[in-house]
Image (cartoon, rainbow, N blue to C red):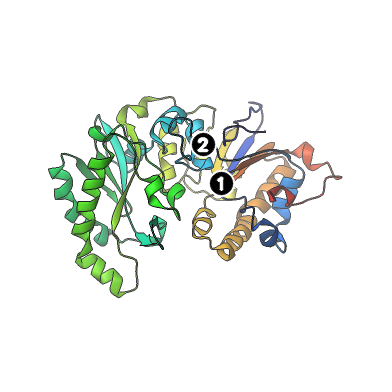
Amino acid sequence: MVGEGTARILPYNRAMSHLEILLPFGLPPAELAKDLLRDLKLPALSMLLGRGNASGGAALVEDDQSNEPERALPHERWLADRFAMGDALRSGGSPPVAPALVRTMGLVPEQGHWFIVQPVHFHIARDHLVLTDPRRLALSEDESRALFNVALPSFDEAGLRLTYGRADTWFVLADRHANLRTASPDATCGRNIDIWMPKGDSARAWRKLQNIVQMDWHASPINEARTATMAEPVNSLWLWGGAPASILAMPSAAAPATALFGFQGWFAAFGALAGASVPGAVAQNVIAASNQHRLLLLDGLISPALAGDWAEWLTQLQVLEALWFVPLLEALQDGKVDAMSLLLTNGTQTRQWQVSRHSLRKFWRKPTLSGLLP
C-alpha cells in the first residue's frame, strides 16, 4: 500500500529496457467507475493491467504543515518527488517549476523567487467563485499580450517584475511573496477558490494586486470582444509554481530516467530539470529509443476529467488504446521493451502496475480493467 497519497518510485534492473508510463486521471472517479467501464473495450490496456502486479490506492490526506488538503494532484506530487523537488513542493504547496519553465521559453531567470502567473476565468457558482480550467480559455497571443500590457503597470507599481512567457503563461519575480503557499490550477479547478488561494504572510498584498488587475480587465476591449463571441472573459490571475531560481541547480532526478517523452505544456519544466526531454512523443519513437529507462507522460485525460466531460474521457481512452497501449503491448511481447510500469491516478489516488514479458505469459490471469474500480 502506498502511503501519504503518493506512489512509491519502484526500483528497477539497470540492465533492462524499462518504460514508465504516467497516466494522470487514468483512474475514473469511484462513483462513476462501474458505469464508465461497463462497455469500454480496451484489450491492450486490459492485458497490461490484468497480467501486471498492482499496488497503490492510497487516498489523499491532510497536509501536515497547513492542516488543509494538498495543493497539488497526485501525479504532480509524484513528478515533484521524482525530480528532487518534493521538499520544495511540500513547503510551497504547488509544483515548484516556475524557474525551470522560464528556462524552457528561452529566458534566463535571474536570482530571486519566481512564480507562474496564468490569466484565468473565475465563474460564479451559487455562493462562491470557481476556477475554470485555463486550457479552455484558448487565449491568442494578441489577446494575451494586450491583457499583459494592461496588468504590467500595476505589477510595476507593486515592485514586482512581470514577464511574458506565452499566451497562457506569464511569470513574476516576487521575492516578497516567497512565503506564499499556492495551489496548482489543476488541483483547484472546479473548486471554491477561497480554499485554494495563496496563503501566507503576504497573501493580503497579493490579493490586493489581483483585485486591481481584475478591475482593470473588467472593461477591457479584449474581454468585451470575447464576451461578444460567447468566449469566457479573462477576469483574474492564478499564482502558483513558486521557487527560487537556484532550484535549477538541484539534482536532475531522484531516480534515473534517461529519456522523457510527452512532457509538454508546463510539464516541460521537468524535462528542463532532467535535461532528458525528447521531442516526438509517438509510440514508435519511444519504443525505438536506445535509452534503457524511459518515462512517458500521457496527459490527454486531464482536461476532460477536470471538466467532468466523461464522454470525452472515454473517447480519449480509446485514442490512447490505439496510439499507445496496442503498440506498447506488442513491443513488450516482442522483447523491444523488457518491462513497464504503469502509474494511473485520479484526483485523490494512485495505483501502479508492474508488467514484464514474463508476467504476460501468465495465461491464467485474465485481461481485465477491474483494477480501475474502487
Say few, some or many: other residues with alpha carbon within 10 Å of mark 2 (under 14 / 14 to 19 / 20 or more).
few
At mark 2, the secondary structure is loop
Camera sees residue 137: yes
- Figure check: 63 above or below 219: above
Direction right: furthest residue: 364
Disc 1 vs disc 2: which is toward the camera?
Answer: 2
> Looking at the image, which residue is at 40% across and 45% down?
196
Of residues 110 and 344, the one drawn nearer to the viewer in this rendering: 344
Which amino acid lies under the numbered mark 2 shown in the image of this protein? Glu
| Mark drawn on residue 56 | none
Quadrant in the rendering for residue 317: bottom right
Quadrant in the rendering for residue 1: top right
Q: Which residue is mark 1?
A: 285
Say few, some or many: other residues with alpha carbon within 10 Å of mark 1 (under 14 / 14 to 19 / 20 or more).
few
Labels 1 & 2 near each other (Cβ < 8 A): no
Residue 372: percent from left, percent from top: 68, 50
Sequence order check: which comes first, mark 1 or mark 2?
A: 2
- Figure check: 287 above or below 223: above
Image-based side of 53 in relation to 190, left or right = right
Of residues 213 and 317, the one drawn nearer to the viewer in this rendering: 213
Direction bottom: furthest residue: 228
- Figure check: 340 above or below 318: above
- Figure check: 164 above or below 160: below
Camera sees residue 146: no
At mark 1, the secondary structure is helix
Q: Which residue is mark 2?
A: 62
> Looking at the image, which residue is at 29% across and 75% down?
228
Image-based side of 372 in relation to 152, left or right = right
> Looking at the image, which residue is at 22% across and 41% down?
205
Residue 215: percent from left, percent from top: 20, 58
Which amino acid lies under the numbered mark 1 shown in the image of this protein? Asn
